[in-house]
Amino acid sequence: MDSYRLYDPKHNGGLWVGRDYSGGPLWKGDPLNNISHGATAMQAARFYYMAETGRLVSKQYYADFSEILSNPGIQHKFVKGIQKSNPGAEIYRKSGTWKEFHADSGVISDKENGYKYIIVALVEHPEGNDGLARFAAVVDATMDRIHKAEK
């Protein structure tokens, strides 16, 4: 991730992976907070933008990446909100939860109406899952209105 500048301690950090997801030992805590995993909304959005525009990985890796993230196993957060507002939309995303911290990020594609957008949200709240679902539904409805107004 260093070569893509997705983490910058001078600008509030970014994407950080300091241990595996199986709960193994910390390899290296992030320089700002000594946490094992971290993200800022801006760097998560940059990650998706770079991937979408072919600046992150090869087309094959991007296809694999998209496929892996396109089948969410849990219908919560953004998935719940988008499915409510736009059941035909395609979504690939990555979410996470730790204590009362909730995160979701992804790319939403409405092929029927011909638009795509990146969405990222990080929140600290006991009802963060439901809040992120409501947020995603509002964002998706807004993107739909904007797209239709531009036609």
Image (cartoon, rainbow, N blue to C red):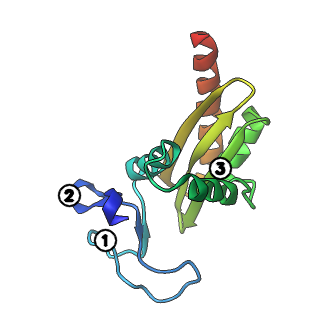
Instruction: Tell me the residue at 32%/62% (across/down).
Output: 3
- Distance from the alpha carbon under mark 2 to that under mark 3: 30 Å
State which tag comes first along the sequence, 1 or 2.
2
Q: Nearer the viewer, mark 2 or mark 3?
A: 3
Dot 3 falls on a residue whose secondary structure is strand
Residue found at the very far left of the displayed protein: 10
User: Where does residue 39 sit, x and y in percent of width and height?
Assistant: 42, 59
- Please provide percent x and percent y for residue 9: 24, 62
Q: What residue is at 64 percent from the left and 23 percent from the top?
A: 144
Frontmost residue, 61 versus 116: 61
Q: Nearer the viewer, mark 1 or mark 2?
A: 2
Quadrant occupied by the N terminus: bottom left
Residue 127 point in image, percent of width and height: 60, 54
Residue 67 higher or lower than 108, as above or below: below
Rendered image: mark on residue 10: 2
The amino acid type found where label 3 is placed reads Tyr
What residue did someone put label 1 on? 33
At horizontal 60% and vertical 56% (from top left) the residue drawn is 60
The CA distance from mark 1 to mark 2 is 13 Å
